[in-house]
Image: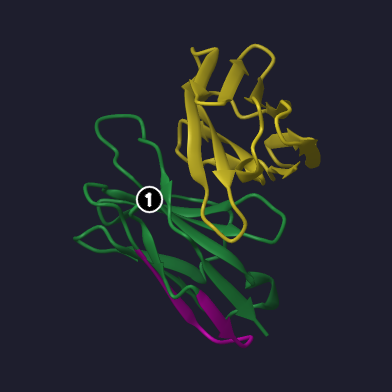
Chain colours: A green, B yellow
Amino acid sequence: ETGVTQSPTHLIKTRGQQVTLRCSSQSGHNTVSWYQQALGQGPQFIFQYYREEENGRGNFPPRFSGLQFPNYSSELNVNALELDDSALYLCASSRRTSGDTDTQYFGPGTRLTVL
Amino acid sequence: KNQVEQSPQSLIILEGKNCTLQCNYTVSPFSNLRWYKQDTGRGPVSLTIMTFSENTKSNGRYTATLDADTKQSSLHITASQLSDSASYICVVTPNDYKLSFGAGTTVTVRA
């Protein structure tokens, strides 16, 4: 186990709805990254939060947004859900010190199905 | 176009045999290259991490190599076990931290 937890494990939504996914990072970690993984594909970087601020974003539209809290847990919010948003959403926590990023530890993921 | 390409897409090997997975990347410059193992329905787990100046890194029966000149990396699995059945993902970290993931190689180990 990596110490990173995500909730819920599975979720079914309909097109146009909004969803919030949650991630609790490993103790001592200050950085959380979110990824979308379509079936049979590698994870795609959505964005990263470092000390409660967005610190880099992948090629995802603004309807994908996030938050990081003072305890370094994080939320991923997706508005106006589309069918193509169906995927496994992974969060990964790490501990960034002065320079490089430490190894990322992944949670088990949230499987989102949009109907 | 994905900046990290992995091959083969999938492979089947017999228990006890060795195999080598390939990763070619175009990301440059980069901070480090990692190999992850992802079991079906689970999050990826780190196997190895190498900076651009390292050539090889081992973790038990897993050995990763890196050739920064040709922008190639490989992951060698020795004496495969049934529990090695998983997807193996190559990840390159550029300096802006926007990690680039390969699509993965699915390894199936059969008894």
Q: Position of residue B4 (x, y in %)?
A: 67, 35
Q: Position of residue A2 (x, y in %)?
A: 38, 50
Foreground pick, B77 / B80: B80
Q: Examine the rendered structure and indicate whether residue B29 appears above or below residue B108.
A: above
Residue for badge 1: A2
Question: Is residue A35 covered in magenta?
Answer: no
Q: Examine the rendered structure and indicate whether residue A70 appears above or below residue A9.
A: above
Report the residue at 40% width, 47% height from top: A105
Q: Is residue B27 left or right of residue B60?
A: right
Q: Position of residue B95 (x, y in %)?
A: 46, 30
Q: What residue range appears in magenta? A: A10-23
Q: Amino acid at mark 1?
A: Thr
Q: Give the crowd class for mark 1: few <14, some 14-19, many >=20 residues within 10 Å.
A: some
Foreground pick, A77 / A87: A87
Q: Main secondary structure of the magenta part?
A: strand
Q: Position of residue A6 (x, y in %)?
A: 40, 66
When asked about the image quadrant of residue A12, the answer is bottom right
Report the residue at 54% width, 23% height from top: B29
